Amino acid sequence: MRRPQSLLFGFVFLLFSYHRAFSSADSLALRRLQATLSQLQSSPAVRNGTVALSVRRVRDGVPLLEFNAQLSLPSASTLKLATTATALAVMGENHSYQTTLEYDGSIRDSILHGNLYIHGSGDPTLGSSRFTEFADAPTLLRTWTDAVQAAGIRQIRGSVIGDASAIQTQPVPDTWVWGDIGNYYGAGIHGLNFNENLYRAVFKPAKTVGQPAPLLRTEPPTPFLQLQNNVRTGPAGSGDEVIIYNAPPATQVFLEGTVPAGVSEFGVKGSLPDPAFVAAFALNERLQRAGFIVHNAPVSVGPGRTLETRNLAIAPGTRRTRLHLHTSVPLGEIARQTNYHSINLYAEALLILAGNALAKSPVSTEQAIRQMIQFWQAKGLDLTGFRPKDGSGLSPVGALTAASLSGILAAMSKEKSFLPFYDSIPVVGESGTVRGLARGSSAAGNVRAKSGTIEGVRAYAGYATSADGELLSFTVFVNKYQPGTMKSVMSYLEKIMVQLTTLKVGE
């Protein structure tokens, strides 16, 4: 793997004209790259769609090549790079979320005359099993139960309450589609998230194609959901063809589609409409199994859900006492997981985190996007045509220009948190969602790229190390390619990545 000179020796702030940058680069290699773009644009796969590319030299931000780079196009998950860059630049790589276990009221004779609260701060990783050195959901529940016992509590004359009030925006961006938000990748953000806000629905496929596939169970159990199962059995090897329809905070869930024949069980992942309630429910169940008495049913509070005083032992607003503090993994690691595994939930949470910090008050998704744009504009970037609708790129109507994203990537190199951001992006041919790309070529190990895919869109953005050790930022979009032509499109995209590493652009 080449180590870019700009990472080894720092980034030099110089002003160059576009002409000077182009003439100093390897013009033959640039013409070859331009020819590849033109061939892809005129190919049967994309002649009715759009190809866009922007390549910049990172140390000064100067464009080296632009091809339809000023057109606003769907970015898919490459938008996560802008979101994670903003969060790291604003908050720093060491920022962590904090979740507290609290109670109100008083403890007398082992009885809590009050309520027990799980008070979230928007941590999207709370209870996740991705982090080996941090507590997963079962471990957290044990820890919280031990904390209650250590406080001398054996009975709660109130409720276990999931407090999601830290985030006041609606859980799901306005432009996400109905067919996405009930599935795991469409999980909304809440002030109290838990286990990545997902559950597994496990089916028993029939032996005959077309027959119903009974729902065996959910993991974890979700007795609070009303599950209407219309799933049937599909052909062997057909995979997960289930769509889950649900919208937070509603409890009615519709399961449609097929699971493959030929297996004894088949699980699919759905999104939890009210994870704050799920956390409270799980802790309530754990406490009762451990012999604690909890008088009232678990409840949650958050946007659109207020606590009814008559159901509580103590009126809302009473001073709370902390029993336990859980600190999340550092933001640098959350960003790495976001970009390596393309986790929409994490990206949406980081957008709100950065937006709240920049605005110095709670913001909606739309307001957080505005704060992100203003943040980079204040650094001199032209973000004309940068019009995202969320933080993850799941929205089908958000759009941005290749030039705007490559500009943010170049500008990020001047931030203190650039190195953890750079390391958060998967390496082509080696890791993340791009580990299978361009293996055995000069792009493998020399290009870091975030992939993006939604219907009719294939996109990549990140950094490439040129033949002479210069770090380049790039963004490439292929929009509205013909169905069934993915293999052809990908061969061109791999060629483009290889050609980026053959450029000589230094002076």
Image: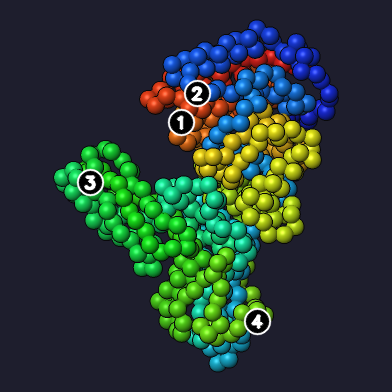
Residue 49, labelled with which disc? 2
Labels 1 and 3: the sequence-earlier one: 3
Q: Residue at x 55, y 76 (%)?
A: 307
Secondary element under disc 2, as helix, strand or loop, is loop
Q: Is residue 499 left or right of residue 241?
A: right
The residue carrying mark 4 is 318
Q: Amino acid at mark 1?
A: Gly
Residue 456, labelled with which disc? 1
Q: Is residue 358 left or right of residue 217?
A: right
Which label sits in the foreground, 3 or 2? Answer: 2
Instruction: Determine the CA span between mark 4 and mark 3.
Output: 53 Å
- With respect to residue 363, does 310 lie above or below? below
- With respect to residue 260, does 327 lie above or below? below
Residue 52 shows in this picture: yes
- Asked if marks 4 and 1 touch (Cβ < 8 Å), the reply is no
The residue carrying mark 3 is 233
- With respect to residue 339, does 325 lie above or below? below
Q: Tell me the quadrant of the picture where the C terminus can be found.
A: top right
The outermost residue toward the right is 14
Instruction: Determine the CA span between mark 1 and mark 2.
Output: 9 Å
Instruction: Determine the CA span between mark 4 and mark 2.
Output: 59 Å
Instruction: Determine the CA span between mark 4 and mark 1.
Output: 53 Å
CA neighbours of label 2 inside 10 A, class few (<14), some (14 to 19), many (20+): some
